[in-house]
Image (spheres, rainbow, N blue to C red):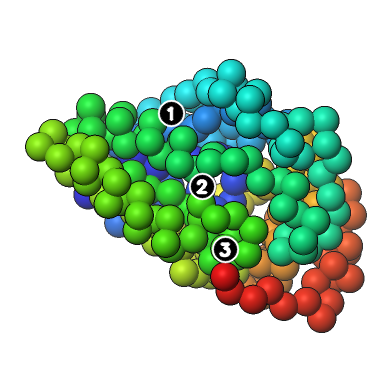
Amino acid sequence: MKTLVVCSGGLDSVSLAYKVAAEHTLIGLISFDYGQRHRKELEFAALAAKRLGVPHEIIDISNIGRHLSGSALTDDVAVPDGHYAEETMKVTVVPNRNAIMLAIAFGLAAARQAEAVAIAVHGGDHFIYPDCRPGFIDSFQVMQDHALEGYADVVLHAPFVMRSKADIVTEGAHVGTPFAETWSCYKGGERHCGRCGTCVERREAFHLAGVEDPTVYDDPDFWKAATAGFRADEV
């Protein structure tokens, strides 16, 4: 399939880009600037596109993101430390983010005669983010089938939606993802903090996958206490 990948620059989406490049026809990467405090992730998306030899575009929706208030990712709200699936992590929700981004991506894909839009939502996101769940993915496909009827047929490709972060690390290693050239930390500092939900989840995923983690963390051992005895239930 001729596929456009929504790529934030994070471990999941960069791994997806490499997977699509290996299995389909990757026509480009698209990223979104929605005013996120960890905007430096976009630099890693650009780097992935350069490595893969495909175009990369950043769509500026920061004016929209400014109105989606209340999230630790866009407002002056502290990013909490701890396991990604803890109740406190709900402060990182940006309302309807994936629906907004995907609607734009599908429009671009249709205009460019692409056959698919790929997104890296995964099973570990289900606990917190409703727009990462299988029901959302299925429903969005139905909506787009109606929206583009008679004009284009574009598939929403979400190969990780029922898989874990550790599975993505395993898959990423298989397709040669340069993990050191990805960014996860929501705090957007010089290095990964090692304490926020995405850092904890990232470090845990490498451990569970049995793959060496090349990431430099300010607090490389915090994840052990944060994940001890924790189990997230599927939504």
| Comes first in the chain, label 3 or label 2 | 2
Q: Which residue is mark 3?
A: 126
Q: Quadrant of the C terminus?
A: bottom right
Badges 3 and 1: C-beta atoms under 8 Å apart? no
Find the distance from the CA under tag 3 to the CA under tag 2. Answer: 20 Å
Find the distance from the CA under tag 1 to the CA under tag 2. Answer: 12 Å
Q: Is residue 46 left or right of residue 106?
A: right
Disc on res. 86: none
| Comes first in the chain, label 3 or label 1 | 1
Helix, strand or loop status at disc 2: helix
Task: Residue 43: give x, y in percent of width and height.
Answer: 60, 30
Q: Which residue is mark 2?
A: 14
- Nearer to us in this view, 66 or 182: 66
Q: In the rendered structure, which amino acid carries the disc numbered 3?
A: His
- Reply above or below: 116 against 54: below
Local crowd at mark 1 within 10 Å, few (<14), some, or many (≥20)?
many
Helix, strand or loop status at disc 1: strand
- Nearer to us in this view, 127 or 221: 127
| Comes first in the chain, label 1 or label 2 | 2
